[in-house]
Image (spheres, rainbow, N blue to C red):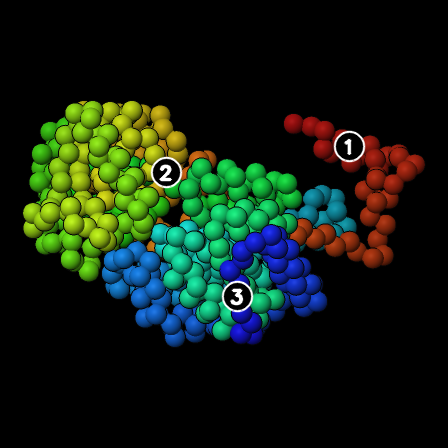
Amino acid sequence: MNAPQKTLIGSDTELQLQTALQAQRDSYLAEGEVSAATRIDRIDRAISVLVKHSEAISEAMNSDFGCRPREVNLMTDVTGSIECLKHCKKHLKTWMKPEKRPTMFPLNLLGGRSSIEYQPKGVVGVLAPWNFPLGMVFEPLANVLAAGNRAMIKPSEFTPATSALIADMVAEAFDPEELTVFAGGPEVGQAFSALPFDHMIFTGATSIARHIMAAAAKNLVPVTLELGGKSPVVLSRSANLQEAVERVMVGKMLNAGQVCIAPDYLMVPEEDLDDVVEHATAIVSQMYPSLLNNEQYTAMVNGRHYDRMHDNLKDAEQRGIKTVTINPANEDFTDNPDQKVPPTLIINPDDDAICMQDEIFGPLLPIKTYKKFEDTIGYINAHPRPLAAYYFGDDTAEEKRFLTGTTSGGVSINDVMFHMLQKDLPFGGVGPSGMGAYHGMEGFKTFSHAKGIYRQPKRIPVAKLAGFMPPYGPASEKSIQQKVKK
């Protein structure tokens, strides 16, 4: 343990990565069966290092963002990771148990038995994003370790202080042949994604995921992609409007909207538009009486993303789209070194507006109105499948229509984002919003190989009795006739 973790620079990047991968794979093969005790020990070490460095983690993320609340850092990245690790620790012995499966006739009558055993895949590559720079390492890592794997981690270059701390924590708690971290920019990420891992998980933008998948395809590496998309919120006419808007805005303003499952646009009955705007303004003003010097209001992570928010707003202005800026203290954002963006509602934007093209990933919320509830279903289905979808209302028929009529990675009813917090529910996308899932049993299976096993009785000539052994005759015909029928 305590081996230094390196930031890779220069032409030897690929060699260093390949050497680390080979060391982990050799160690994994030498270990043989990965016992439950070993898996629990690794999980315990991960929990211990997170507990020990929790305040330092928060300070690092605050440094990277310029302003990110301690409470957000601890409640999302730190406690979310610890909860995932503890959940896996509690259940992994059950998940590891072989599963009995039915054996086909007539082999079942002759003593044949079938089962599935879950085997570690080996070495997993973890490519993490910047928005939850620690949580999106350790939450999937909980399943990776529970499944008995080793892992190589590539944290985001956009959060250098957090990435450096992750490297130090991993080096403190793990041998590099178990877990190791490689920081660096796009050149490291490119070399990392091209490695012949046994599995790879990437969390980030859909545009980058295409390159990750293409690189993985060269080595036929299976991938789990957790991406994003424009997650819709539908407010039914049966919804408690004030309660619904409060829950939407609480979720939207978390991390200043820099969340992959943040509400990306809101659909409301046309007659409720003014009330929704009024409620949203009042609720945000209660949460954040001021913005610029408020340590509880998160800044944009860097200049590029700050500029991207202003590009959305400039585009809306040029198109003549109404916007409502929520600025409770009427502050002047001209002098804004932390690059904060005030919450802004964008009213009925057309589909060609920038804010309706790509995931916003910031504190801007388009609001679109509808006449008939069925219009919301058609609109959602006319666009790429999102990572999350949200319905607020008390109409069971509408709720069922929403659940069965739209496809998304996950759903929360009468709230936003809480489905992701349930550690026993699979979390992942569908189509452009991702593939595969982690959390719970599904996450354990994602990072395991489900090995099918058939056991044949020793002294019974099964092939002959079942008609599989030449010369073919009555037994063969009997077997065929039993199966070739309606």
Q: Which residue is mark 3?
A: 5
258 relative to 48 in the view: left or right: left
Q: Quadrant of residue 407?
A: top left
Q: Which amino acid lies under the numbered mark 3 shown in the image of this protein?
A: Gln
Q: Which tag, 2 or 3, sits closer to the chain's start?
A: 3
User: Please, is residue 315 above or below residue 243 in the view?
Assistant: above
122 relative to 241 in the view: left or right: right
Please tell me which residue is depicted at 56% across the width and 51% down the height of the picture: 192
58 or 35, nearer to the observer: 58
Q: How many marks?
A: 3
83 relative to 335 in the view: left or right: right
Dot 1 falls on a residue whose secondary structure is: helix
Q: Which amino acid lies under the numbered mark 2 shown in the image of this protein?
A: Gly
Please tell me which residue is depicted at 12% across the width and 33% down the height of the picture: 273
285 relative to 259 in the view: left or right: left
Callout 1 crowding tier (Cα within 10 Å): few <14, some 14–19, many ≥20: few
Q: Which residue is mark 2?
A: 229
Q: Which residue is mark 1?
A: 480
The CA distance from mark 1 to mark 3 is 61 Å
Residue 98 placement (x, y as % from top left): 61, 59
Please tell me which residue is depicted at 61% across the width and 55% down the height of the picture: 12
Would residue 74 be visible to someone looking at this image?
yes
Please tell me which residue is depicted at 15% across the width and 34% down the height of the picture: 323
The CA distance from mark 1 to mark 2 is 51 Å
Q: Which amino acid lies under the numbered mark 1 shown in the image of this protein?
A: Ile
User: Please, is residue 387 above or below residue 377 in the view?
Assistant: below
Q: Which tag, 1 or 3, sits closer to the chain's start?
A: 3
289 or 374, nearer to the observer: 289
Dot 2 falls on a residue whose secondary structure is: loop
User: Please, is residue 65 above or below residue 40 in the view?
Assistant: above
Would residue 268 be visible to someone looking at this image?
no
Callout 2 crowding tier (Cα within 10 Å): few <14, some 14–19, many ≥20: many
